[in-house]
Image (cartoon, rainbow, N blue to C red):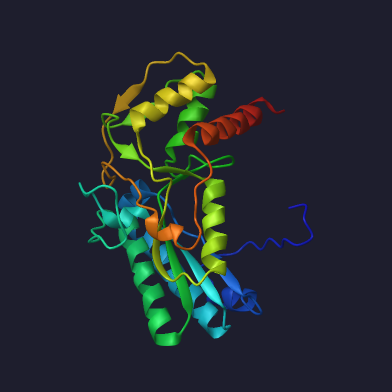
Amino acid sequence: MGRDNVEFIQGSVTDLALLQRLFRGVEYVFHQAALASVPGSVEDPLATSEINIGGTLKVLLAARDNKVKKVIYASSSSVYGDTSAMPQKEDMPLNPISPYALTKLTGEHYCHIFRQMYGLATVCLRYFNIYGPRQSSQYAAVIPAFIQRACQGLPPVIFGDGAQSRDFVFVKDVVQANILAAESGAEGAYNIGSGRSITIRELAESILRVMGKNLTLVYEEPRSGELKHSLADITKARGFGYQPRWTLEDGLAETIAYFSEERNSP
């Protein structure tokens, strides 16, 4: 890691004994661990449930037992389901349509219960589509998948007609949101996005334009459990100081530069 103030421990979020040991003397726990794939959750709902729900419960138990000051839980915009109401607001009805989304909503309910019953401060950040350098395309993250194919001279593959839209938020803005949520009095659920959306087709065209690639987009059948549209209302998160600083254009430029350099490095 190259830093004296960072300790890396390889383990599982489902290992309660490990969590109990690690949380001793800790003020804040940023719970980011999950199987974060909607298609993966459709294929294997049991593993997704055991890690996302079981792991979250164990994080909360260890935090409660060690008197952690606050748990910041990574939730997901997928809890809203496939709604036509835009933008999505925290007080909207929730309707998860995939096992992954259901596990994230269950984690929110557990956070609420631990806050009510045990006095453990929790805040749930409903991430929209995060992107940035070092992101893996392993979990169907569309931006690194598009960039990596374009780097190889291959056209981006779009599942569906490309008219589906997403709210993409740069990873550095998400880090800012986590720190602000921890240090403020924020509790409950908050949307973390950019407050703007773009279609997947427009996204692919923007990436090819920035990279100077002339490739014809490829379309395949849509995948089950995925939403048609998402757009965050971030008014509530602004209340604890959250303010996105990165435009999609600037974020894409930094992300493309990273993947291009990684591909060209020996």
Q: Quadrant of residue 227?
A: top left
Tell whether 87 sits left or right of 184: left
Q: Position of residue 49 (x, y in %)?
A: 37, 63
Say if 121 sits above or below 72 in the image: below
Q: Please state which of residues 109 and 122 is positioned toward the viewer in this rendering.
A: 122
**Residue 75 higher or lower than 209, as above or below:** below
* Residue at 28% in and 63% down: 91
Would you identify the image quadrant in which residue 118 lies? bottom left
Where is residue 125 drawn, in percent x and y? 43, 60
| Viewer-closest of 72 and 176 | 176
The number of numbered discs placed on residues in the rendered structure image is 0
- Judge from the rendering whether residue 218 lies leftward or rightward of residue 260; answer left or right: left
Instruction: Kindly tell me whether residue 150 is visible in this rendering.
Output: yes
Q: Residue 152 in the image: x percent, y percent?
A: 53, 21
- The residue shown at (46%, 35%) is 143
Left or right of 136? Residue 237 is left
Q: Position of residue 197 (x, y in %)?
A: 36, 39
Image position of 113 with respect to 187: above or below:
below
Q: Residue furthest top?
A: 214
Quadrant of res 176: bottom right
Residue 51 visible at all: no
Q: Which residue sits at x=22%, y=61%? A: 93
User: Which corner quadrant holds the C terminus?
Assistant: top right
